[in-house]
Image (cartoon, coloured by chain):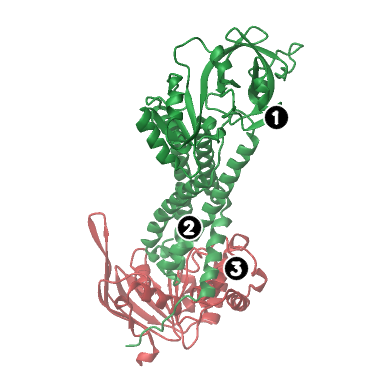
Chain colours: A red, B green
Amino acid sequence: MNPEQTAVSCRGVTKSYIAGATKVLALRGVDLEVSMGELLMLVGPSGCGKTTLISVIAGILDHDEGDCLVFQQDLRALGQSRKTRFRGQNVGFVFQAFNLLPTLTAAENVAVPLLLLGAGRAKAIARAQEMLSKVGIEDKIRSLPSQLSGGQQQRVAIARALVHEPRLIVCDEPTSALDHDTGGRVMEVLRNTALSSDRALIIVTHDNRIFNFADRIARMDDGLITLVESQVASS
Amino acid sequence: MPQPPPARVGVKGRDSMYSIALKMLIGDRGKYLGIIMGLTFASLLITQQSSIFTGLMTRTYGFITDTSQPDVWVMDPKVQFIDDIKPLQDTELFRVRGVDGVEWAVPLYKGLLKARLEDGNFQICNVFGLDDATLVGGPPVMLQGNLSDLRRQDAIIVNDVGANTRLSRRPKEPGGRPIPLRVGDTLEINDHRAIVVGICQVTRTFQSQPVIYTTYTRATTFAPRERKLLSFILVKAKEGQDPKVLRERIAQRTGLAAYTAQEFKDLTYNFFLKNTGIPINFGIAVALGFLIGTAIAGQTFYNFTLENLRYFGTLKAMGATNGILLRMILLQALLVGAIGYGLGVGGATLFGVAMRGTELAFRLTQELLYISAGAIVIIIIFSAVISIYKVIRLEPAIVFKG
């Protein structure tokens, strides 16, 4: 694979935790490649290491051994503040519980990544409004998260993950807090607005109702990727 | 290997992050008000109790403040404070007058004497006997009559607070208002008739007794017979004579204690500070205000941070450095600190205004404002530090926990 087209390249990645007196091996030597323009789903039972793996890929957790390059950059080699900046520029996050700041409006929430990158408030809010239009909730710009439905909140979170045009989007169970129809619509929005040839998406899920949105599905079990399946995404 | 392009938070973006910090704080109304309440309480209690303490301590040397003419106060070497009267022989006055650099020296009587009121009750009064010729040491403000009226037969001047309260006459009707002592009224001081010829205003004293001014000769007549009755000698330095040098010379030549007015105030102040329970009582109240304020504000601020950890983690994951988060928390702490301090000091000031003219001593000085501000700064730094510690140590991976 052309290195320029490789978003993520993991080789023999391990990660362990200390839980009480026991050492828990969360990742036991993961090998994984994710290409630009690809939507990869990481699936598997609870506790199999999915969240640990995306935490390592997103640069918010350091792995113990092996190599993990994100856009050919070994994040473990970066200092804390450079790694934080790398995340701010290159990674967008969508969380299971949305994690929208409850006292900020939808537009303000979406503008946060831009503000962190140094954009002026007016410019950031204008860009945030554009993003909210793209995800179909332009009429909720001034709403607080508490005034939005679960599906609308997740759309705001998607807009926030995309607003600064990162090259990698990491989603953790984006549909698990939503009903089937809403989850489906959110996935459509995610796939249609987030996926492009210069961006990769990794979605952690065990919601098999959305598997059809994936280009590839990587199955994990007990800290290892056991199977990678290619498929034609439905939309 | 390609390096990530440098990205620094611009000034505009940083300012916007500060506004987000404030929105996070103010949006949580309950916690926000709780923190401000704690800081207001601390600021109010610290400022108010310190002001009462300062007011009370200022009263201890109120008479020295009111007596502005003399440069040096001469007294028995064993005197520890203004009310600690250890009388001198009258001849000491002449010895002091003989010291080089003395422009004039006059006697002053100060003593607690019993006044019999019209209704037969007795009231202890603080009686000052002024030099018959010069009346040096008289009250700073005359409300009725003149100081020179003291030269009339049996004349006394009474302070307004004493005339309106403890020396006032019984109301004509039961339940009515007491009738203030007026010019022309008479009192009986130690079996001697005294006629009120004037009403004056003086700085309230520590003991809150009515203050009576009369001449030195008459005061020594009122006082029980003793061999020594001269309480203080008030000295004016000649022009160009340094009062500190003069007081050294007087002490050396006469063997008496001599202090400048400021030194005598300090002596009195320090005596009350070291030998009474006043500082410890007020100190405890101030410390309680500080501790309770710290506990309420610190805990509420910490709880606010704990409840927002997920969002701080989210910001961290999205690229907020520890420096940005630290400044956001400091700004939040600064805001609640400024509001709490302002409300507390404002409350204390209103209290002082409301208590003006009453028995309560209250003196809010600039120094007390600084002390109160310092205490609030310590509280908010403590509150912020425990929160910052939590946020700095926060693993951004917390955002992936459900």
Q: Are marks 1 and 3 on the same chain?
A: no
Residue drawn at (43%, 63%), measured in percent from left and top? B326
Q: CA distance from mark 1 to mark 3?
A: 69 Å
User: Residue B308: which numbered mark, if any?
Assistant: 2
Q: Secondary structure at mark 2?
A: loop
- Image x and y of residue A233, in percent: 48, 82
Q: CA distance from mark 1 to mark 2?
A: 63 Å
Q: Are marks 1 and 2 on the same chain?
A: yes
Residue type for callout 1: Leu
Tag 3 residue: A106
- Image x and y of residue B353, in percent: 64, 38
User: Residue B38: which numbered mark, if any?
Assistant: none
User: Residue B143: which numbered mark, if any?
Assistant: 1
Q: Secondary structure at mark 3?
A: helix
Q: Is residue B375 left or right of residue B361?
A: left
Q: Nearer the viewer, residue B174 or B262?
A: B262
Residue drawn at (53%, 50%), measured in percent from left and top? B31
Mark 1 or 2: the one toward you: 1
Q: Is residue A102 visible from the viewing direction of this image?
A: no
Q: Chain of mark 1?
A: B
Residue type for callout 2: Asn
Residue drawn at (72%, 19%), measured in percent from left and top? B182
**Marks 1 and 2 in Cβ contact (< 8 Å):** no
